[in-house]
Image: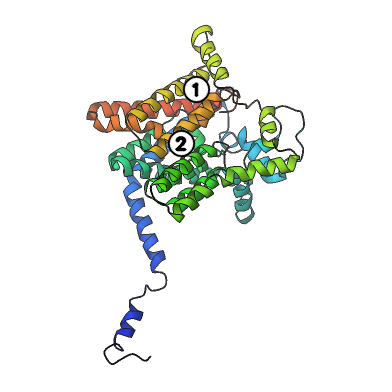
Amino acid sequence: MPPTATEAPLLPKARRSRPAPGTAITGIRTRVTRSLRRAAPALVAYTAVRVFALLVLGVWAHKEGHGIWPTLAADWDSKWYLGIADHGYERTLGTEYDANNLAFFPLYPVLVKALAAVTPGSRATVGLLSAMACSFVAAWGVFAVGDRLHGRRVGILLTFLWACLPVGLVQWMGYTESLFTAFVAWSLYAVLTGRWVWAGTLAALSGLTRPTGIALAAAVGLCGLFALRRRFSRRVLTGVLLAPLGWLAYVGWVGLRLGRWDGYFAVQRLWHNELDGGVETLRRMREFLAYDSTPELFLVMVTVTLLASVVLYGLSVLDRQPLPLLIFTGVLLAIVLGSGGVYFSRARFLLPGFPLLLPVALALARTSRRFLVIGVTGAVLCAAYCGAYMVLVWPSAP
């Protein structure tokens, strides 16, 4: 039926009321810009800490006659990831210990290979620069979570503390921690803001990055199931279903590649990474704290970090942190403390557990200006010294 005389003039207005092409993109760009502006002080603080630590490392390395670029870009685990980018994965399990590269998850080496194919420079350079870029995305996400929960001041302090972790130098090495923490931070932020599809997608990507991605999948999945009990939502269900897919996909692929259902776990056994309920962790702690009269400084730092993490988790529970954060850090701690594998890397494995730092950030936000200055200065100096010691004195992997 043709429109009446009174209806006809409304048609052009109806057409004009539709969003113009690109309006959604403009809106997203505006929100991102505002978010970056709000996070700018946190990102400046993060950059200042990491640059200072890098300068200390450079001076120390120069005095020792070492170069820092190969150490940051192509040593230890970086070498494994670059090997995967260059030659791919093993096809057999083998019997040699600490030798099968199927223990390393694929997203980071695939990303390095793809970027190196379209940019100048070596894959080691691309890998290091990619990790550094991801560290800023991670720092932004850490701030976003802190700001969402307790305001801008706490968000800035939380980001600063994450930069000052004793193993924080790893954030600017050719490792996966920066990429993984970026997925963790923004996935948790997505859960806190009700963006379940984003939360599940980022959790899935984290599961392709590190084995502890299962901790983030647990946080998103369990919180999503609790939300579904209250009210059904297809978006929530989609996020729940997406969350574990990355981890399951890689573990399943390794099983198919090796022709056995437990292929990935067999690889981990060759790397001595089996869950033993914390027996090995307690044995090493007792050894360093009670029996070793001259313990290695780096191992003492690792031990103190593990003990402090347990205490901070207890404080996080008492502070009634949101459930997604508690589930993620709880499962992450259970995996790290319950592993019978290498001990010296466990402080690094906890680096993505930034919610554990929230009680400290809250305490600093409430303290006096004088104590805050002392705490900030001490944290920066400790981060710089521990980072340089970790790569120049400690003889093994971070």
Q: Determine the image quadrant of residue 32.
A: bottom left
Q: Secondary structure at mark 1?
A: helix
- Return the x and y of residue 141 as percentages of the image width and height: 41, 45
* Residue 288 seen by the camera: yes
Q: Is residue 55 above or below residue 220?
A: above
Q: Nearer the viewer, residue 12 or 286?
A: 12
Pointer 1 residue: 302
Q: Secondary structure at mark 2?
A: helix
* Left or right position of 221 against 73: left
* Left or right position of 37 against 253: left
Give whichever of discs 1 and 2 has the lower sequence position.
1
Mark 1: few/some/many CA within 10 Å (<14, 14-19, 20+):
many
View extreme (left): residue: 368
Amino acid under disc 2: Phe
* Residue 125 seen by the camera: no
Q: Cα distance, mark 1 to mark 2?
A: 21 Å
Q: Quadrant of the N terminus?
A: bottom left
Pointer 2 residue: 328
Q: Specify the label residue 137 is tagged with.
A: none
Amino acid under disc 1: Val
- Return the x and y of residue 216 as percentages of the image width and height: 49, 40
Q: Determine the image quadrant of residue 255.
A: top right
Q: Residue at x 54, y 36 (%)?
A: 212
* Left or right position of 35 against 53: left
Q: Nearer the viewer, residue 337 or 168?
A: 337
Q: Nearer the viewer, residue 75 or 336?
A: 336
Q: Is residue 215 above or below residue 129?
A: above
